[in-house]
Amino acid sequence: MPVARARSAGKCRDEPWLSNKVILRRPESTDKSVDGPGTRSARRSATLTGFIDEFARNTQIQPPTDVESCALSDLVRSFDQHPVMVRRTILELFAKAPQKFYAEALHLLNTDLRGTGRDFLISHLLENELLLRAVADPEAFPIKTAVTLAANLYQIDQQLDARLLRLVMREGGLGRDPDSSLVHVLNIIDEISDCTRLVPLLMRLTKHGNNRVRSKAILLLGRVHRNVDWLQQQLSVADPRYRANAIEGLLYAQPGDKEIQLLWAAATDSHHRVATTALRVLHHFGQQRAADQLVELTEHANEEFRAAAAWAFGEIGQRKFLEVVQKMARWDTGRARRAALKAASKLHALPEEPAAVAASVNPREVLPVL
């Protein structure tokens, strides 16, 4: 289960650090027996400071080397001597070049910089969504690091998924490849969010000009858009990626009988990715016959179907299918053999399954309409 998706549902509330007035205070007391407003505020500030430090340590952005950017370091270090003038100058630097500002700011925070200048810099990063911009920028962090950082921030701001998506949509993407930043953010959201509050934004992205963006938006919509007619519409789209992603999105939902019947119909799709994804989802929801059909596909005349079947067994993640993919790895060739080897490696690493689990049957299994 994704990092933050398992969090307990609760009423979201606005967080102080998202307002236009962010004040970071140093802890005034270390007495854990006292938990008044001042202590809680200090602990929150310490948590935020820790997140900022983590951002700074992990960023891949190279700091700019022009004169203005180098001046930021001198300004922050001289903050105590001339706070009013330095604050004004820092704000001017930010207004002139936000991208360079946050690159240099993250670099500075990864040095031995301490004091009120550092606190002001952190406050400014928070106030102006520069941390969100860093998470959304595929050039700033590798995807695994970005997901971890976003999940940590999600603990503080449960609107983070919507804020991230609005940011990149408002600016038409970030960095040298705007579409890549949109896909990057959608991949992060895929890991940290249940997407329940994102339906209007995702619906807009289904009309985006980039195929990868549209396809990913459809996958996330399938997770929350509980509408059989919508699913049927997606399954009629010519692009197999859309059909497969609409199906995969159901992994995080609870499909009803009508949707199960649509999935059985999709299991006969002429495209290998659509058919095997449908069977994978059907098996996930206890449709035992789906595994039998996947086994049949391992001997399909088309290599693409055999490879996709091996992939599906690897994604299902049950050790009882290890023998199936090992047999493929011994006797198949080309892409199908490579997919089987990869699935076998994944399944072999799993612990042995209890016999009761391996033999479990879903009492409400829906049979396909023939």
Image (tube, rainbow, N blue to C red):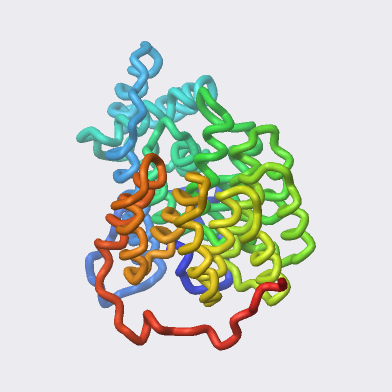
Identified at 75% across, 65% down, the residue is: 227
Q: Residue at x 41, y 49 (%)?
A: 147
**Residue 13 visible (yes or no):** no
The residue sitting at the left extreme is 112
- Closer to the camera, 266 or 142? 266
Q: Is the N terminus in the top left, top right, bottom left or bottom right quadrant?
A: bottom left
- Count of numbered labels shown in the rendering: 0
Q: Residue furthest top?
A: 67
Foreground of the two, 361 or 3: 361
Can I make out residue 165 in this image?
A: yes
* Residue 358 sits in quarter: bottom left
User: Is 170 on the left-hand or right-hand side of 99?
Assistant: right
- Residue under the point 38% across and 18% down: 69
Above or below, comparing residue 129 to residue 231 in the picture: above
Q: Position of residue 297 (x, y in %)?
A: 50, 58
Snapshot quadrant of residue 290: bottom right
Is 195 placed above or below 170 here? Answer: below
x and y percentages locating residue 206 in the rendered image: 70, 44
Location of the C terminus (image quadrant): bottom right
Q: Say left or right for 266 vs 2.
A: right
Residue nearest the observer in this picture, 148 or 350: 350
Q: Does 62 sit left or right of 215 as displayed?
A: left
At horizontal 51% and vertical 70% (from top left) the residue drawn is 283
Locate residue 242, reporting x and y percent.
65, 47
